[in-house]
Image (cartoon, grey):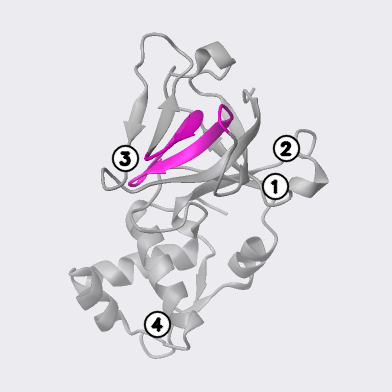
Amino acid sequence: MKKLTKNQKKVLQYVERNLANKVYPTQKEMAEHFGVAQNAIYQRLNSLRKKGYLENCSLRRGTYLSDEYIASKEKPAGFPIVGRVAAGSPILAEQNITEYMDVNGFIKKEHKDAFILKVVGDSMVDDNINDGDYVIVKPQSTVENGQIGVVLIEDEATVKRVFIKPGKIILKPANPKYKEMVYRPGDKDVRIVGLVIGSFRRI
């Protein structure tokens, strides 16, 4: 299916949330929700229809998800790649997933709930995890001291070696030019979201 603009994606997510609750919003209600002119909503809905995401986009007949879009959601190909994490949402929330990638050759069957995170930066180069690489992550809320984990700091995911000490969590980079990150209760919202079980570079 064709890619969506940021505004089109927001409208699609809004429609989808409402339909899931058996609510059928009108274009006027959508315009009020997003704080834009009704004509802008009409244009976005029309674009979503042309791209195959919606059907019956008229005000009179309501808006529905297309069979093609529903089918694409039911059977995503591969494992989810997580992009920037949206505020307050789980790391695997729909708005955080940028695409799906088939990496069955890298992931064992027991890790079918794994997700993929693209690495930004060179803080883990000494562990052979470079800028632009992808790490395969097994979702879990704890890791053993010294293991490489994915940690959510407020709304940003970072990959570091994790050390849990009394009253603090230490995130250690694998590059001497970076300092350890030390957090204590009350500093920030810090939580472990997964264990890194592999990495690779996309060709």
Q: Earlier in the sequence, mark 3 or mark 1?
A: 1
- The dot on residue 103 is 2
Mark-to-mark CA distance, 4 and 3? 54 Å
Residue stretch in magenta:
145-167
User: Helix or strand or loop: what does disc 1 sit on?
Assistant: loop
- Report the disc number at residue 184: 3
Helix, strand or loop for disc 4:
loop
Q: Seen in the image, is 80 located left or right of residue 36?
A: right
Q: Is residue 37 left or right of residue 47?
A: left
Q: Is residue 61 left or right of residue 116?
A: left
Measured in 3D between alpha carbons, the distance from the residue under mark 1 to the one under mark 4, in whole angstroms, is 35 Å
**What residue is rendered at 35% in x and 46% in y?**
155
Q: Quadrant of the C terminus?
A: top right
Report the amino acid beneath label 2: Val
Name the N-terminal-most of marks 4 and 3.
Answer: 4
Closer to the camera: disc 1 or disc 4?
1
The residue shown at (54%, 49%) is 141
Residue of label 4: 58
Mark 3 closeness class: few <14, some 14–19, many ≥20 residues within 10 Å: some
Instruction: Please tell me which residue is depicted at 40% across the width and 47% down the height of the picture.
Output: 85
- Pinpoint residue 11: horizontal percent, then vertical percent: 36, 67
